Amino acid sequence: MGRLVDGFGRRFRYLRLSLTEVCNFRCTYCLPDGFRKTGPLDFISPLEAERVVRAFADMGVGKVRLTGGEPSVRRDLTHIIARTSAVPGVDKVCITTNGWNLQRQIDGWHEAGLTNLNVSIDSLDPEGFRRITGHDRLGSVIAGLDRALERGMPAVKVNGVLLRDTAASGFDAFAEFVRERPVAVRFIELMRTGDNAEFFADQHVPGAVLTDWLATRGWTRRERELDDGPAVEFVHPDYAGRIGLIAPYAPGFCDSCNRLRVTARGQLRLCLFGELGVNLKDLLEKDEPEALRARIVAALAGKPAGHRLHEANSGDTRQLAQFGG
């Protein structure tokens, strides 16, 4: 089978597959008013999810991340994990979750074939966590994460959005969090979307506030692996875990892009902050693998060199839950 390469020579080994637009958190930077239904909830089925994963795996993708919204609002998530992990060529099955169901479900997810876990934790202060997410569940989320570590899951990561209100106080707490835990904590620079312009103006801080903090404390940069996401990670000999940064406003951020996205409605997104998408749903419903692969390859000709966030242009992305972040 052919490999997925765009017009700029970037090879794609990593698929982010959204399973739903629904999220049960009300994070200040994404869905401060909670999820609001804007159309039928006719999201991708387990069979369609398997078909799209198989198409990408046939073209060299070995890492699949299941996202949302919040993927665990789907009762069939464990089934989808199992179908994904059974696809030949897929060696990493990941989810990104807010942790709502993590403590109750992690055992089943792992047994179904989950290899990588990303948990969103924006603050280790219980009140700060409640203020950002709208829920007082920090203890349960951390318990679920620790259970994943107990099971020996090889890749457990924490995602936290870098906010002006929590940056300075949060770094020390997260460093202590990874002192004994082999976890990668990655801070994501706040991105402007269609719905958060005022919040962005108030809360955005550059990623340099973190990298400067790390440099003064002896953390050094870790080499990237081929199918890594966009994070730059740092290590320290006194800590079991790592701390990283995802900085979409940094120069050259898009140069090493290695991931493509399929939305919960079966649209191929060439860029998170692009316009529209390429419909795959009709081919997923009919099970036409050759035509599906051909449409994906043809679409890559339209992938842009990079996003336009520097121009305050986030495409048609209203909020990150819409397309899976």
Image: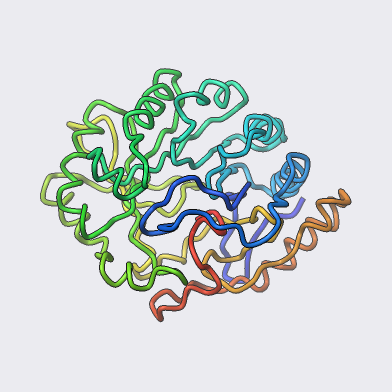
Q: Foreground residue, 272 or 62?
A: 272
Task: Name the residue at 35% across, 68% down.
Answer: 249
Q: Is residue 142 shown above or below 228? A: above
**Total of numbered circles in the picture?**
0
Q: Residue 209, image x and y in percent?
A: 19, 59
Measuring 42% from the left and 51% from the top, which residue is drawn there?
26
Residue occupying the far top of the picture: 150
Q: Is residue 317 above or below residue 2?
A: below
Percent coordinates x, y for residue 189 in the rendering: 33, 60
Q: From the viewer's perspective, is 59 left or right of 12?
A: right
The residue closer to the viewer here, 71 or 212, is: 71
In which quarter of the view is residue 203 placed? bottom left
Q: Position of residue 124 (x, y in %)?
A: 25, 39
- At 15% from the left and 48% from the top, the residue drawn is 169
Residue 150 or 258: which is nearer the viewer? 150
* Residue found at x 68% / y 37%: 89
Picture coordinates of residue 62 (x, y %)? 62, 42
Q: In the displayed structure, does residue 254 sit left or right of residue 36?
A: left
Left or right: 252 in relation to 176: right
Asked if residue 110 lies left or right of residue 263, the reply is: left
Displayed quadrant of residue 128: top left
Type of colouring:
rainbow
Q: Quadrant of residue 9?
A: bottom right
- Residue farthest to the bottom, as pictured: 311
Q: Is residue 16 above or below residue 147?
A: below
